[in-house]
Amino acid sequence: MASGGSGEVYPTLWGFSPALDLQMHCRQSTLQYLTTCDDIPELNILLVGCGDGRHLLKTVCQARRWPHRKLHFFIIESDLELLARQMLFLTLALETSEQMGLQEKCEMFLELFGNSLVRSKTATFLQEKCGMFIRCVTDPEYQQSVLPQLDMSSIKFKERDELEYIFKFWQSPEPKLFPIERYWDVKNRQYLGRRYDSRRGAYDWDLNMKLHDHGAVMINAMDYNRWRENGVAFTIREGNYDVPNKTLASQMSVTHRYGKVRARGYWGDITTSPYIAYGIETEEKSLLKTVNGVHTKTAQDLSKFNITAMFHELVTGQKYSPSVLSKDEAEDNSACNVSTSRETEATIQEEVTEEKNGSTDYFMKIDNIEIHFLPLSWVNELHRRSKFLNLFNLVFFSCSMVHYLNAEYKLITARKATLIVELTKFMVDLHLDKVKSYVTIVTKVAKEAGFTTTENIDWKRDYIATFERLEDYVEEKNGH
């Protein structure tokens, strides 16, 4: 959403819809018209404003479920901090088992993803990685040797300098540079106003009458209230969460007595929560069990399981399932709280050992995946670059960036292209009438951009809307 009066967009630190395996949501008619390279079909995907990279990660981790394809991702974000975070999450997912075990990787990911405060161990990990990130953005050859899947060639020198500045800020061990607890409380007070003294009631109202009523029933009151109060969403590991998570920092133009100035602070979400991205849906139906109408697992449990499953599948190519527990054990133990088995560790170790060829082989290598970071300024300029014409088979727009969708996007989409637009179903700040009217607005914007929906969009049920190129759809309908 644009910040009030400034025309800027608040950073989408986590999405307002669950993570998608984009190959699952790509229309079959789209897949029939893929171009090929070396006899391998190529799926070109443009992601505009996803923020947290959740769709990228899930699609990459589950790529081996689908017919062999080359996946090319092109990513545009509203803030460079969001590209920096996606770079962090990508490298964390690709950490070898020699560097980090599966359970530890999952816990660190969730802390950095959704916590205002992290453990000192997690903060140390982030600081140590920043030296590599700085070298990656300043030395393209080094970046290609370390992360050959990532293409940053389109990022301008000025943006590289800003990325270097961001990573140096993350690298600093000084917690006073980002007093997130103070920022969070100030933002909470501004948002709630006179309701601040009775904020617990406001939290419960938002949870029960909005998030639960819209389908996010896995979010429990204790976790949600804690996050609304101090920004700590995930407390999976016992320990002290007391170090500011600097990856949540960003800059925004604010009004000062001397005029507009750029100020670093926390400008992200304080109402919807990070639980939506990974914590309200799962393939493991045993985690959706209820007792007396109450879910036995929480969004925190689902988030841990889903991230663990994704990272496990990225390495092994096999679906992850929790250890089979006896009925008695099942009552006392969470299927989410599982560590990597010896057999799985052995498999991971064997695969990684084969790939370790030099000092820069810090991460797992993944074939047929390319990830291109693009400047924000290109969001309305892609059609002016010949290499993008008729290229994209699938385009995703977040609800915070959909205002950039225009008629030129038909020029850069391929025949039978799929368009996916995130809806506002889980945005707590919006009244129901605006959530409902947003569907009409999105449908109109998509039509003006040359796309049509082939099925009804239910504003109560759906959190995304899927469209197809209008001209192609009409031709097919008329039998041409």
Image (spheres, rainbow, N blue to C red):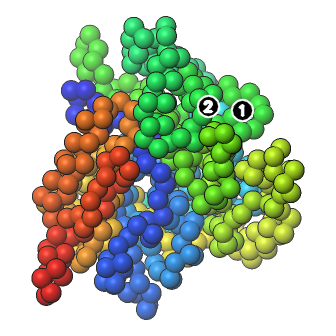
Closer to the camera, 342 or 338?
A: 338
**Residue furthest toward the bottom?**
39
Q: Amino acid at mark 1?
A: Ser
- Relative to 271, is 237 on the left or the right? right
> Can you give x and y, in whole percent of width and height, for residue 133 in the image?
55, 50
> Can you give x and y, in whole percent of width and height, for residue 139 in the image?
50, 57
Q: Which structural element holds mark 2?
A: helix
The residue that mark 1 highlights is 120
Closer to the camera, 122 or 262?
A: 122
Quadrant placement of the N terminus? top left
Quick check: can you spot residue 411? Answer: no
Q: Residues within 10 Å of mark 2 (few under 14, many from 20)?
A: some
The residue that mark 2 highlights is 223
- Relative to 151, is 2 on the left or the right? left
Q: Residues within 10 Å of mark 1 (few under 14, many from 20)?
A: some
Quick check: can you spot residue 70? Answer: yes
Q: Which structural element holds mark 1?
A: helix
- Circle nearer the N terminus (1, 2): 1
Please tell me the numbered disc located at residue 350: none
Figure check: 433 above or below 198: below
Camera-near label (1 vs 2) is 2
Quadrant placement of the C terminus? bottom left
Figure check: 267 above or below 389: above
Q: Amino acid at mark 2?
A: Asp
At x 21%, y 26%, the residue is: 5
Closer to the camera, 238 or 151?
A: 238
**Residue furthest toward the front?**
292
